[in-house]
Amino acid sequence: MRRKKMGLSVIKASGEHEVFEEGKLRQSLNRAGATPELVTQILKEVAGQFNGVVSTRKIYRLAFNLLKAHSRKLAGKYHLKRAIMELGPSGYPFERYVGEILKAQGYQTQVGVMVQGKCVMHEVDVIAEKDDHHFMIECKFHNHPGTKSDVKVPLYIRSRFEDVRNQWIHMPGHKAKFHQGWVVTNTKFTKDAIDYGKCSGMNLIGWDYPMNGSLNERINLSGLHPLTCLTSLTKKEKARLLKESIVLCKEICEHPEVLSVLDLSAKRTESVLHEAHGICMEFNSKDQ
């Protein structure tokens, strides 16, 4: 069935113009858990408030506010892509977040480690192992929508990976293992970057790439939403928790005492925990 299109054109974060497709917004709202009735209501609001040319940011903000008025939990899940960008400005929380997602998928992981290559030492964002697979993973974090990782990124990472792989294959028990370099980004790759990744054997994971196994899909399958999804915390409070190496809503659910560093009132603490548990419990109920 063809997606219904409204009489709108949108300006994306990259500056590109395209016809607004209702189906994309509907899909995002469905993914956040909005009911069909709420989705229809939000789409009507968008159609009624905007015409001509509008930025995707304005459409997002309207949908976010409508969801928030209905449910903080839904708004938090809808906020996911932007919440990942709030893991900055440094890339370390994103590296730890990627490590946690892979751990949930059964990998043994190490984050931020020094690895000896054949020629030189390398600081590697994430090392992941599972069965006879051994991966060196570099995380390219961007905190501006529309930013893409170009071909220079996998080119550079592959050269580092080859130096590490040439050392790994001489380690006991590693000669028969499958070794691979990965690049994970929270935005997108250029076409050249994707083509080079396919040709060279690198595994590239972007927000919506590849079709199966994208970062977005891995997050939704694992249920590991970042604490930056929480609408009941200010940006300053989120930054304080990130400084304490706390990156997941799940960590707040399982260890509510971590909120003590924020010196919140009892009422606000209850609000934060209620929202965090709403996100965590929804995933747990689906998993059962």
Image: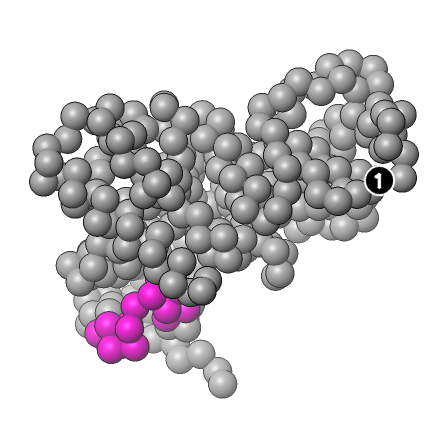
**The stretch drawn in magenta includes residue 251:** no
Tell whether 15 sits left or right of 175: left
Residue 100 versus residue 9: which sits nearer the camera?
100
Which residues lie in the magenta part?
A: 26-41
Disc 1 target residue: 177
Residue that extends furthest to the bottom in the rendered view of this protein: 1
Residue 92's place in the image compared with 131, above or below, is above
Residue 178: quadrant of the picture: top right
Is residue 133 in view from this perspective?
yes
Q: Residue at x 9, y 40 (%)?
A: 267
Is residue 57 in view from this perspective?
no
Q: Give how far across and how far down residue 272 sits, in percent.
A: 21, 43
Mark 1 neighbour class, 10 Å CA radius: few under 14, some 14 to 19, many 20 or more = few
Q: Give how far across and how far down residue 161 sits, in percent.
A: 76, 30
**The stretch drawn in magenta includes residue 30:** yes
Protein image colouring: one colour
Q: Give how far across and how far down residue 136 sits, in percent.
A: 70, 33
Residue that extends furthest to the top in the rendered view of this protein: 120
Three-letter amino acid code at the position of disc 1: Lys
